[in-house]
Amino acid sequence: MGLIKLIIVVLVIWLGFSLFKKLRKPKNSLDQNPPSGSKMLACSVCDMRIPENEAIIQNGKVYCSKEHLE
């Protein structure tokens, strides 16, 4: 009987720890998405889509980085 109680205790502790980790974990998928009102623009060089607030716009063209601007 002692072994069964030990297994049950270990399982309960493991389940509690798993739930605790799951609740503390931030939702990365929400952080990676741009804000809902953000307009996406395509880079003139590589055609990568980036949020308008992160884009570099010069002479009417859109760039994703300083390297592509040069």
Image (cartoon, rainbow, N blue to C red):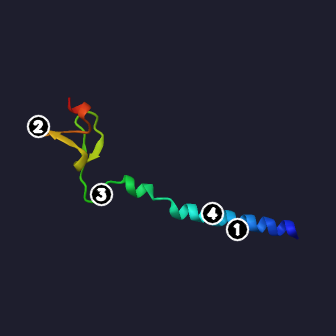
Residues at discs 4 and 2 in contact (Cβ within 8 Å): no
Alpha carbon separation for disc pair 3 and 4: 33 Å
The mark lying in front, picked from 3 and 1, is: 1
2 horizontally vs 50: left or right: right
Q: Is label 4 in a helix, a strand or a loop? A: helix
Question: Which tag, 2 or 3, sits closer to the chain's start?
Answer: 3
> The residue under label 3 is which amino acid type?
Pro
The residue under label 1 is: 12
The residue under label 4 is: 17
Q: Which mark is residue 59?
A: 2
Q: Position of residue 65 (x, y in %)?
A: 26, 36
Question: Which tag, 4 or 2, sits closer to the chain's start?
Answer: 4
> The residue under label 1 is which amino acid type?
Val
Residues at discs 3 and 1 in contact (Cβ within 8 Å): no
Task: Say which quadrant the C terminus sits in.
Answer: top left
Q: In the displayed image of the protein, which residue is found farthest to the top?
A: 70
Alpha carbon separation for disc pair 3 and 1: 40 Å
Residues at discs 4 and 1 in contact (Cβ within 8 Å): no
Q: Position of residue 60 (x, y in %)?
A: 12, 40
Residue at position x 83%, y 68% in the image: 4
Kindly indicate the quadrant of the structure image that contains residue 9: bottom right
Q: In the displayed image of the protein, which residue is found farthest to the right?
A: 1
The residue under label 3 is: 35
> The residue under label 4 is which amino acid type?
Phe
31 horizontally vs 63: left or right: right
Q: Is label 2 in a helix, a strand or a loop? A: loop
Instruction: Compare residues 52 and 4 and report the one nearer the observer.
Output: 4
Question: Which tag, 3 or 4, sits closer to the chain's start?
Answer: 4
